Image (cartoon, rainbow, N blue to C red):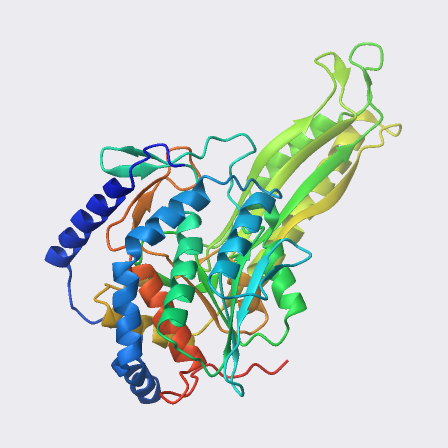
Amino acid sequence: MFFFNNDKLVLIIFYAYFILFINNSSSAQQDIVSVENLVVNTFDQITSDPQVQAALLRILETEPQTIREQFRITEIPAPPFKEDRRADYYLEQMHARGLSDAYIDSEGNVIGIRKGTGGGPTFLIAAHLDTVFPEGTDTRVELRGGRYYAPGIGDDTRGLAALLSVIDVLNENKLNTVGDIIFAGNVGEEGRGDLRGIKAIFRDHPYIDGFVSVDGTRLRRITNGGTGSRRFEFHFKGPGGHSFGAFGLASAIHAMGRAIAKISEIETPRFPKTTFTVGTVEGGTSVNSIAADAIFAIDMRSNDREQLAQLEARAKELALEAVDEENTRWGESSTITVDFNLIGDRPTGRTPPEDPIVQVAALAFDELGIELQELSTSSTDSNVPMSLGIPAITIAGGGNGGGAHSPGEWFIPLDSHLGPQVALLIALSLSGIEGTSKPLLKEFEN
């Protein structure tokens, strides 16, 4: 039960923000993505369909229920690697919406397939189940000053709720697609989850032809680029000993310090953007011990695969230099070593603006009066299919919010219905509607 415990208040606040949106909305058309005539014509066939218009209206009418569903999901904790409770609930919601064959796979993803009429592509749309917050975090939703606060309320319970709204209107309005649509609540998007959920889905379903990730709240951009990352623990090891009695032995912590100092001087290009940071350090036994173990975790990122590989090679080279220097400093008996343990691997990738999946998303923004501010590059679940050459983008789930990854994360239902509406138009355009339009998504050749 929500902390504020007032469903009528959800309705009042939603409609107040909806009126504010109507009074301030713009009908300007985006000029960032150039759209081909075939895509425009197919999209027009979709939006002219009376069933589609009814579905769009129904999303608006049922948005207060979608918001309540968003809050219910928020209050089910989903710490990293412990998404089970939320997955079980999400599976129940898929079953309740007619996806009777939905299941939880071996990785913990919730998978529901809405079969098409046949002969079309397979389209995957997903939102992630996990949050960044540790076990024991209070996830109750609280209303304060016109904002709803709770850890994870936007990232990504908004996406999860938007998907359920899309399933609802597809069924209610008897919209039969040509291609299959896979709906997924996936695990492991955040942090050390390392995109494990989406990696498993594409491993187990190699026939998927296109992907949309619904993540976050504000509809401002289409993410069509994937920032790659490589994360390591550099583990320094040595004999260790008493700080006074064994003085003269090399220290794992000293070697680690040398390595960090060297790595901190690496110069990386501004374009393509390439970055690094040593985020955590640990090691040692006590203040009066020569350290036998020391570990630092390093995050390296780039929008370019080659630059990322060069950065990784250089960081490792400098760590080995630091070990040599530490051993040389203390003589032949010194035996410091370093191991490089991979803890995160997010591939780079890009979906070109010429791809129908990007063009359809841009048209959906136009259709609904949303200002498309940019095509962006980020680290999302879409990295995985992009790296495989499968067209993929990430869009937001609607509404306004902030404070993601912090205990003060907040959400307000300003234009929140637009999220599932955009997702619906993209899904229908790519998958095709029986008797109305052909799929724009091409079947991927493995």
Q: Nearer the viewer, residue 135 or 99?
A: 99
Q: Residue furthest left?
A: 23
Q: Is residue 35 left or right of residue 434?
A: left
Q: Nearer the viewer, residue 258 or 80?
A: 80
Q: Nearer the viewer, residue 119 or 61?
A: 61
Q: Which of the 4 quarters of the picture holds residue 411? A: top left
Q: Give the vertical position of 171 relative to 309 (above or below).
A: below
- Residue in view at x 62 percent, y 47 percent: 231
Question: Is residue 5 among what the camera can see?
Answer: yes
Quadrant that contains the C terminus? bottom right
What percent of the width, then of the height, locates residue 379? 49, 55
Quadrant that contains the N terminus? top left
What percent of the width, then of the height, locates residue 287? 70, 13
What percent of the width, then of the height, locates residue 67? 33, 49
- Count of numbered tags: 0
- Residue in view at x 80 percent, y 25 percent: 330
Q: Is residue 413 left or right of residue 359?
A: left
Question: Is residue 355 among what the camera can see?
Answer: no
Q: Is residue 3 left or right of residue 188?
A: left
- Residue in view at x 30 percent, y 58 percent: 62
Q: Give the vertical position of 101 relative to 353 (above or below).
A: above
What percent of the width, then of the height, locates residue 110? 57, 57
Q: Is residue 221 left or right of residue 199?
A: left
Q: Give the vertical position of 428 relative to 167 (above or below).
A: below
- Residue in view at x 41 percent, y 54 percent: 161
